[in-house]
Amino acid sequence: MLRWLLSCALLIVVGSFTSSGQTGAANSQDPKFPSHPGFHPSPEAPAMPKALMKFPRTNITSAKFPALDFHFHGARLRTAEDYKELVKLMDDAGVGVICNMDGGFGKTFDQNLKVGEPFRDRIIHFARIDFEGINEPGWSARTAAELERSFLAGAAGLKINKVLGLDLKNSDGSYIQSDDPRFDPIWEMCAKHNKPVMIHTSDSYGRFLPIGPENERYEAGLWRSSPEGNYYKTGQPTPDVIEKARENMHAKHPKTRFVNAHMAMLYYDMDKVAALLDKYPNADVEISATIQDLGRGPLMIRKFFLKYQDRILFGSDGNPGRGKEEFWEPHWRFLETYDEHFDHPAQLRSATGAPLHGRWRIYGIGLPDSVLRKVYYANALRCLPSARASIQKRLAARR
């Protein structure tokens, strides 16, 4: 009995020491990150629990209809061999055409267009303007002129990433937003040539909230080791500021087609997505990097897809390094089946294999063929007529 009491006392002392040590570490400030008070590194994420309950699985190795992937990153495409390997992967996965968001600008765009010329029916390039010198006189006119040259050379559209709104600054240090007058000639140039603007504004809502395990973006932000990419109290614009500027942009340029990436970064509140689409006829959305969230609410999301079936485009946010089975196939299962409780297409995984874009599983929404056709390719073809022949060729081959 005495030995048992001594053992318990020792465990209490050791446990108290360990707990106080951990608490102290948790409350300490990491000197490497002064802009994020209270941040501290955390241990590696634990492994994702394996489900014991058995669920039926639909084996889908290829999209039911040739997909037009409106959001793909092809920065790794440097040689003809790179293109050949990607086309083979596309054929295996049932992807008819991809839009490379990393086409570049100026000489970089010309080089990408040249190398990819033999594959232009499968891989089309978007220009990506250079923000260098944005605070200098004449930047808008020069950029719009170069953009027009890119369109005439073969650019299928324009890609704008989230630095506009979150990082790009005026000379006085204030942040530049998408409704800034300097962008008016650029948006109008896209309308003149009937080219879509793929625009990524803002970021995941969790990135604007405090860092901590209670934030569901904790793993996705890689915040166990660094607070980089978290905007909470950093002085950067909040989502409401960015969203208001985006609305102004849509309103000022009704003839420009804006495809809002990642469900306009509003997938956490589908009423907001609906409001954007209802108010602005020139707005569309694409679904890349949102399956992990949309798949949590299959009944609600299916109703949304049915209602807005003419305004939703397929996109994956993929790149040549992401494989068919773990990346593209979960998209097909989500869109085409009623499968339950399956792994989402995690873009990143921890060393233990845990998905960093959400420690949960998703459910399919089983869209009817008429809607699948629109999401997979028909809606995109409205603003990408150059891809029509390639998609029709692949449709004919499947009959």
Image (cartoon, grey):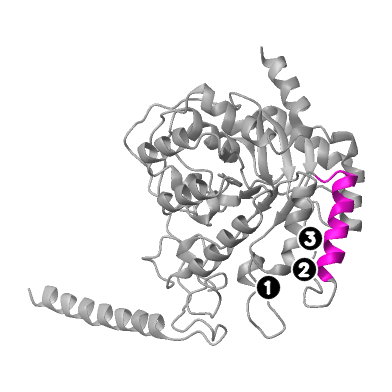
Separation of residues labelled 2 and 3 (CA atoms) = 6 Å
User: Which residue is located at x 37 percent, y 85 percent?
Assistant: 24
- In the rendered image, residue 141 lying in the magenta stretch gets the answer yes
User: Which residue is located at x 75 percent, y 55 percent?
Assistant: 188
Query: Would you call the spot at circle 3 few (<14 residues within 10 Å), some (14-19), or many (20 or more)?
Result: many
**Region rendered in magenta:** 139-155
CB atoms of marks 3 and 1 within 8 Å? no
Left or right placement of residue 29 versus residue 322 in this view: left
- Viewer-nearest residue: 363 or 267: 267
* Residue 258 shows in the view: yes
State the SS at label 3: loop
Residue 131 circle label? 2
Determine which quarter of the picture holds residue 245.
bottom right
Identify the amino acid type marked 3: Ile
User: Which residue is located at x 68 percent, y 28 percent?
Assistant: 92
State the SS at label 1: loop
Determine which quarter of the picture holds residue 326.
top right
Left or right placement of residue 42 versus residue 318 in this view: left
| Quadrant including the C terminus | top right
CB atoms of marks 2 and 1 within 8 Å? yes
Identify the amino acid type marked 2: Phe
Judging by the rendered image, the residue that carries numbered circle 1 is: 168
- Viewer-nearest residue: 49 or 397: 397
User: Which residue is located at x 13 percent, y 73 percent?
Assistant: 4
Judging by the rendered image, the residue that carries numbered circle 3 is: 129
Query: Would you call the spot at circle 2 few (<14 residues within 10 Å), some (14-19), or many (20 or more)?
Result: few
* Residue 44 shows in the view: no
CB atoms of marks 2 and 3 within 8 Å? yes
- In the rendered image, residue 56 lying in the magenta stretch gets the answer no
